[in-house]
Amino acid sequence: MKKEKKQEAVQQAEKVIAEAKVAVVTDYRGMTVAEMNKLRRKLKESGVEYRVVKNNLAAIAAKNVGREGLKDLLVGPSAVAFCSTDEVAPAKVLTEYIRTTKPSLSIRGGILQTRMLSAEDVTALASMPPREFMVARVVGQMKSPLYMLVTVLNGNLAGLTRVLQARKEQLEGGSN
């Protein structure tokens, strides 16, 4: 590869690595082209980009964007799943694919923002509930105390209304 092409490849890799919230490195040795295409389709459906990378160029790009830890995972044939929208999607799709198809694909590890992940960490990340569920759970927990406060305040107002209604009926009953 000529020097200009290498520089261009590094720049493209820098852009992808910098934008990615998560990158999961896999060893794809032994996978057929059909298996690789099937995996790529599944990943693409989840908004994940899957690339076979040149280790040296990817390591340079990772270092340039401040994610040097990625270099340690780039040993031997490597393919990386990048996602800039969902931190959990690559881990979920890859672990599900490995579980269901039992290919020769293996997860080496990954990087979440700037935190290094082992293969076990990636598997644990895959078992997390979806982001929407977590957001709904937090909102529900925040809403609960407010709901209880409104209920208590409404209870006091309802009690006051009943007392005033009873007093009104008492006064109306006394004038007849």
Image (cartoon, rainbow, N blue to C red):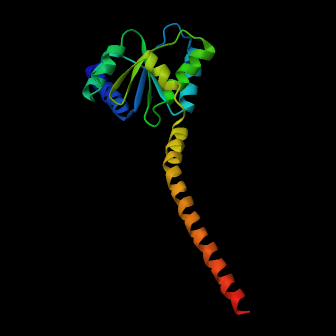
Specify the quadrant that holds the N terminus. top left
In the image, taking residue 62 as reference, residue 169 lies left or right, namely right
Nearest to the observer: residue 125 or residue 15? 125
In the displayed orientation, state which residue is furthest to the right. 176
Quadrant location, the C terminus: bottom right
Q: Nearer the viewer, residue 127 or 50?
A: 127
> Would residue 149 appear left or right of 118 to someone viewing this image?
right
Q: Residue at x 61, y 74 (%)?
A: 163
Question: Who's the residue at 54% across and 55% down the image?
Answer: 148
Residue 165 pos. (x, y %): 65, 78
Quarter residue 175 falls in: bottom right
Q: Is residue 149 left or right of residue 80?
A: right
Furthest toward the front, the residue is: 174
Residue 139 location (% of width, % of height): 50, 47
Residue 41 position in % (x across, y down): 57, 26
* Residue 1 visible in the shown view: no
Position of 131 relative to 53 (above/below): below
State the count of labels.
Answer: 0
| Rendered view: 142 above or below 1 | below
Question: Is residue 148 in view from this perspective?
Answer: yes
- State the residue at coordinates (37%, 35%): 19
Q: Residue farthest to the bottom?
A: 175
